[in-house]
Image (spheres, helix red, strand yellow):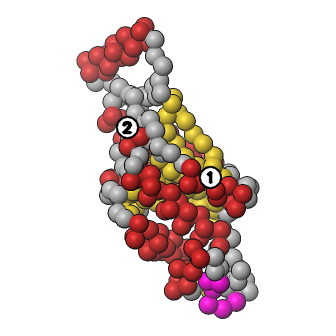
Amino acid sequence: QEEGTLDTSRLYRIPSGDNKICRRKVPGKKVDTAISILCDVSGSMGGSRIDMLRPTLLVIADTLQALKIPFEILTFTTDRPNLTSKERLLLEQARDDWHSTGLKTYNRYSTLWHTVVKSFTENYMSVRKLIPLIEAHCANVDSESVEWAISRLAMQREQRKIQFVLSDGQPACSSVSTHLVEKHLIETVTKAEKSGIEVIGVGIQTDSPAKYYPTNVTIHNINEISAGIYKTLLMKLRN
């Protein structure tokens, strides 16, 4: 492992285990950055998209490990709601009330399912083998999941904080209004960026995340993973 001026032309070496990615050694200030990687593992991410998410996640994590940048890996989805007949009637009534009164408050009744695959303090190599096992199911409450990830990231002592969100775009969960769920996500990202946390949306086989994340990149196929991720990381780490 070398420390010094990053040589962008050498980043392709990381997947092969070669971490000599610095042009020359330079004493002084290090990259004072912490990065959180939040992954959408809802049902719509199944099939080819989850197959794309796994190597994309590995590229990001392997790169951060080589650069000695602290990071954590999180996933989000929901549990299947097990509503009683009475609860379903109450939900239907709530929907009717919303449409009749024009209520504009955020709402959600899906049960959140958040998983810490790797915490900031955990050894990456000990959990790396879990990434190929990540599966997709149920729904995605993006806004509250992003809030959760950002709240964890905010506790890190590093001066600079970057939040990656890997998803296929639009929030989809059991709620009275999909519009309010989307609006809440946009507000969450805006609030995070105003607080100084940088948020990057990574679209997996879709550019839909661009609607919610001003800074975004799209990965259409496996050949675009390294170039797309390295370009985004370098853009951030060089600034």
- What is the span of residues highlighted in magenta in the rendered image? 20-25
Tell me residue 73's x, y (percent). 60, 53
- Residue 172, label in figure: 2
Callout 2: helix, strand or loop?
A: loop
Q: Classify 35 as above or below 189.
A: below
The residue positioned 41% from the left and 46% from the top of the image is 46
Q: Give the position of the N terminus as an image quadrant.
A: bottom right
- The CA distance from mark 2 to mark 1 is 26 Å
Whether residue 91 appears in this view of the structure is yes
Q: Amino acid at mark 2?
A: Ala
Q: How many marks?
A: 2
In this image, 26 relative to 166: left or right? right
Query: Which residue is nearer to you in this view: 61 or 235?
Result: 61
Q: Amino acid at mark 1?
A: Leu
Give the mark nearest the N terminus, 2 or 1: 1
Q: Which residue is mark 1?
A: 130
The residue positioned 41% from the left and 66% from the top of the image is 222
Q: Nearer the viewer, mark 2 or mark 1?
A: 1
Query: Which residue is nearer to you in this view: 138 or 101?
Result: 138
Q: Residues within 10 Å of mark 2 (few under 14, many from 20)?
A: some
Tell me which corner region of the image, top left, top right, bottom left or bottom right, holds residue 26.
bottom right
- Residue 102, label in figure: none
The residue positioned 43% from the left and 74% from the top of the image is 227
Callout 1: helix, strand or loop?
A: helix
Whether residue 184 appears in this view of the structure is no
Query: Which residue is nearer to you in this view: 71 or 15?
Result: 15
Tell me residue 212's x, y (percent). 37, 51
24 is within the stretch colored magenta? yes
Q: Residues within 10 Å of mark 1 (few under 14, many from 20)?
A: few
Tell me residue 199's x, y (percent). 48, 58
Q: Classify 48 as above or below 106.
A: below
